[in-house]
Image: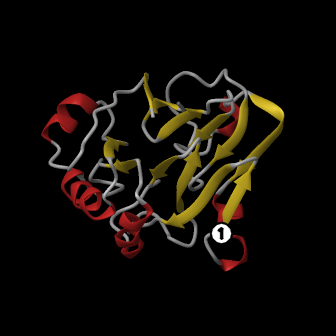
């Protein structure tokens, strides 16, 4: 069973059954000592792209928004059986031509890391993908707030929805306890869960 460490802000670490490690938007928290097989960056804001924080295996594959959007589409990558699909992300603070989210399939688990975004038209199609986990920002300043994130959770239809990327100093637990999203799962910074 794969694991997810929520490092804080928009930063995640996935660990597969075989020990392979995927970092998403490295920036905040601890737990960057496990050497990366894959690093995913949703966009180039400095609170999402600190790849230098990650220990890396020699063959580490780094995919940023640049590779994800190369050729004018949202690209798909198969990295040794870990599937990464870039998807639309954006809002008034994040140009959709420079930002992506990712749907990652690892050991049969589908996880949607939305990146910095507000609701997108593409989210309505995600219910058909039968996502296991979806993570949404909820700071309400650079991205959508918790109410819009709850609406996104409703339309994407994941089995578990997690609120992340809140205002600095805001309690994840207190905010998520009031979050009116279906199938919500509260994961605090520094907490690792089995997926």
Q: Judge left or right: residue 155 versus residue 63.
A: left
Coloration mode: secondary structure
Compared with 173, 65 (above or below) is below
Q: Which residue is mark 1?
A: 69
Say which of 179 and 105 sits in front. Answer: 105
Q: Is residue 91 visible?
A: no
At x 59% / y 44%, what residue is drawn? 106
Q: Is residue 11 visible?
A: yes
Q: Residue furthest right?
A: 58
Residue 13: % across, % down? 56, 33
Give the quadrant of residue 35: top right
Compared with 29, 134 (above or below) is below
At x 30% / y 54%, what residue is drawn? 141
Residue 7: % across, % down? 48, 29
At x 47% / y 53%, what residue is drawn? 115
At x 25% / y 42%, what residue is drawn? 184
- Quadrant in which the C terminus appears: top left
Say which of 45 and 33 sits in front. Answer: 33
Residue 90: % across, % down? 44, 66
Say which of 76 and 101 sits in front. Answer: 76
Give the quadrant of residue 128: bottom left
């Amino acid at each position: 069973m794969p694991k997810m460490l929520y490092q804080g802000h928009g930063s995640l670490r996935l660990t597969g059954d075989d020990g392979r490690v995927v970092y998403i938007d490295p920036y905040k928290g601890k737990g960057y000592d496990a050497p990366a097989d894959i690093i995913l960056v949703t966009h180039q804001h400095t609170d999402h792209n600190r790849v230098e924080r990650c220990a890396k295996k020699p063959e580490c594959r780094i995919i940023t928004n640049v590779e994800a959007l190369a050729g004018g589409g949202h690209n798909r990558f198969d990295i040794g059986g870990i599937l990464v699909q870039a998807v639309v992300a954006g809002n008034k603070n994040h140009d959709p031509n420079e930002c992506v989210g990712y749907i990652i399939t690892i050991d049969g688990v589908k996880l949607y890391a939305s990146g910095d975004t507000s609701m997108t038209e593409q989210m309505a199609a995600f219910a058909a993908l039968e996502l296991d986990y979806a993570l949404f920002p909820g700071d309400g300043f650079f991205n959508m707030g918790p109410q819009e994130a709850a609406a996104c959770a409703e339309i994407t239809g994941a089995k578990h929805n997690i609120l992340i990327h809140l205002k600095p100093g805001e309690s994840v637990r207190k905010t998520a306890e009031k979050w009116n999203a279906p199938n919500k799962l509260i994961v605090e910074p520094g907490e690792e869960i089995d997926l």
